[in-house]
Image (cartoon, rainbow, N blue to C red):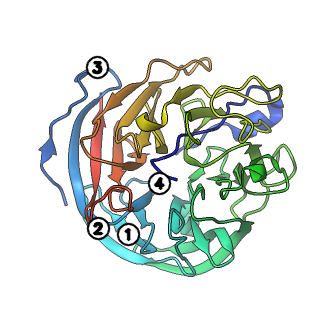
């Protein structure tokens, strides 16, 4: 479940050099400013300001910017609506994703990713729940409306909880997706299942060249990963909700096994890899992640805070994690880097049934870094 369970996934340590190279990196109405409560104002990499830019949302789940930074697309999980939002926060509905349905829990319209070549092909990709399971689909977006619909990947099992759902393009031009174990832990270890995995695919939903098993699967052993982001070196970071004790931040490597359901948190089992950072479930239950200035920013649901985790671009070490906005804005879902700026967009999902707030109570913030 979101916000009541912790993250679980293990960090990969070894993979073929050729495959690792293919997997490297992804490019990834105005309100009044609100005070920063970080306690570290002015520190390099720390949030220095937070501003509410858009209100009236109900479970805004995914955010993806046009490559030129002119607008972003934002999905609402349970309404299946897609909105374009200007940098100042003005929003306009541009369509619905056909065939979407909820699971009475955490399924619905989830991740969104605009094609890096959007100016030429106008493609946008969605991950959503349908009658036959979770799907990855492609539509055409001309800047004002969504048209067409093509299912690219089907057969991802759905469940009330543990649907994963994040999409992101890598700097290699391939599309990455996170899938949950659909509340069946054994699927995470099954290489023939698309569940409990990080997937890597072409723009037509086929296995990307160099994938370690010759399928869509990039890594396995995941419980419910919901955060995907690439750093300045092109490395893929993922945040994952665990079971009862350990939420995790992982560095994803092709072919690596991140341990679920054998392990939660650090794992001494041969062939399974450890997370780079763990948290207790009450402190995190992470969803989205973004990278700015060699730091991973991780939005937390149950933890109701934004975590900053410094990462070393020259090795795999991570620094001391710092928490911001603890309990101030409620459940934090999506965090996305603003193109061309040291800024983040950060959204709440307090209207998701766990936050106790009514429909229309969610917000999107702009956070300035450094």
**Distance from label 1 to label 4 (Cα)?**
16 Å
Assess whether mark 2 and mark 3 are in contact (beta carbons under 8 angstroms): no
- Whether residue 214 sits left or right of residue 253 in the image: it is right
User: What is the CA distance from the residue labelled 4 to the residue labelled 2?
Assistant: 18 Å
Choose the circle earlier in sequence order: 4 or 2: 4
Residue tagged by mark 1?
Answer: 83
Q: Residues within 10 Å of mark 2 (few under 14, many from 20)?
A: some
In this rendered view, identify the residue nearer to me: 87 or 228.
Answer: 228
Earlier along the polypeptide chain: callout 2 or callout 1? 1
Circle 4/circle 2 CB separation < 8 Å: no
Q: Nearer the viewer, residue 44 or 10?
A: 10
Q: CA distance from mark 3 to mark 4?
A: 29 Å
Q: Pick whichever of labels 1 and 4 is earlier in the sequence.
A: 4
Secondary structure, mark 4, is loop
**Gap in angstroms between the C-alphas marked 2 and 1:** 6 Å
Instruction: From the image, tell me which residue sits under label 3.
Output: 43
């Amino acid at each position: 479940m979101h916000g009541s369970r912790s993250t679980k996934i293990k960090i990969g340590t070894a993979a073929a050099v050729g495959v690792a190279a293919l997997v490297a990196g992804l490019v990834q109405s105005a309100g009044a400013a609100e005070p920063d409560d970080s306690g570290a104002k002015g520190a390099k990499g720390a949030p220095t300001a937070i501003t509410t830019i858009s209100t009236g949302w109900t479970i805004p789940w995914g955010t993806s910017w046009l490559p030129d930074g002119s607008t972003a697309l934002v999905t609402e999980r349970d309404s299946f609506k897609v909105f374009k939002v200007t940098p100042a926060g003005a929003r306009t509905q541009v369509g619905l994703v056909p065939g979407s349905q909820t699971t009475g829990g955490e399924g619905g319209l989830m991740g969104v990713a605009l094609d890096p070549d959007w100016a030429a092909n106008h493609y946008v990709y969605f991950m959503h729940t349908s009658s036959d399971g979770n799907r990855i689909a492609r539509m055409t977006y001309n800047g004002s409306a969504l048209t067409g619909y093509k299912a690219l990947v089907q057969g991802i099992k759905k469940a009330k909880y543990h649907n994963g759902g994040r999409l992101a393009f890598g700097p290699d031009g391939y599309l990455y997706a996170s899938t949950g174990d659909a509340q069946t832990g054994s699927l995470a270890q099954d290489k023939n299942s698309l569940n409990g995995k990080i997937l890597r695919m072409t723009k037509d939903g086929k296995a990307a060249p160099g994938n370690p098993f010759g399928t869509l699967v990039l890594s396995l052993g995941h419980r419910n990963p919901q955060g995907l982001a690439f750093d300045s070196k092109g490395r893929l970071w993922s945040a994952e909700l665990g079971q009862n004790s350990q939420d995790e931040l992982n560095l994803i490597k092709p072919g690596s096994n991140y341990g679920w359901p054998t392990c939660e948190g650090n794992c001494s089992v041969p062939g399974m890899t450890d997370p780079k950072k763990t948290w207790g479930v009450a402190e995190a239950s992470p969803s989205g992640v973004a990278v700015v200035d060699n730091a991973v920013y991780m939005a937390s649901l149950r933890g109701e805070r934004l975590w900053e985790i410094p990462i070393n671009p020259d090795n795999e070490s991570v620094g001391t994690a710092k928490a911001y906005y603890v309990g101030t804005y409620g459940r934090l879902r999506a965090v996305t880097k603003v193109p061309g700026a040291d800024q983040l967009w950060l959204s709440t999902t307090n209207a998701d049934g766990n936050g106790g707030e009514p429909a229309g109570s969610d917000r999107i913030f702009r956070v300035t870094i450094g």
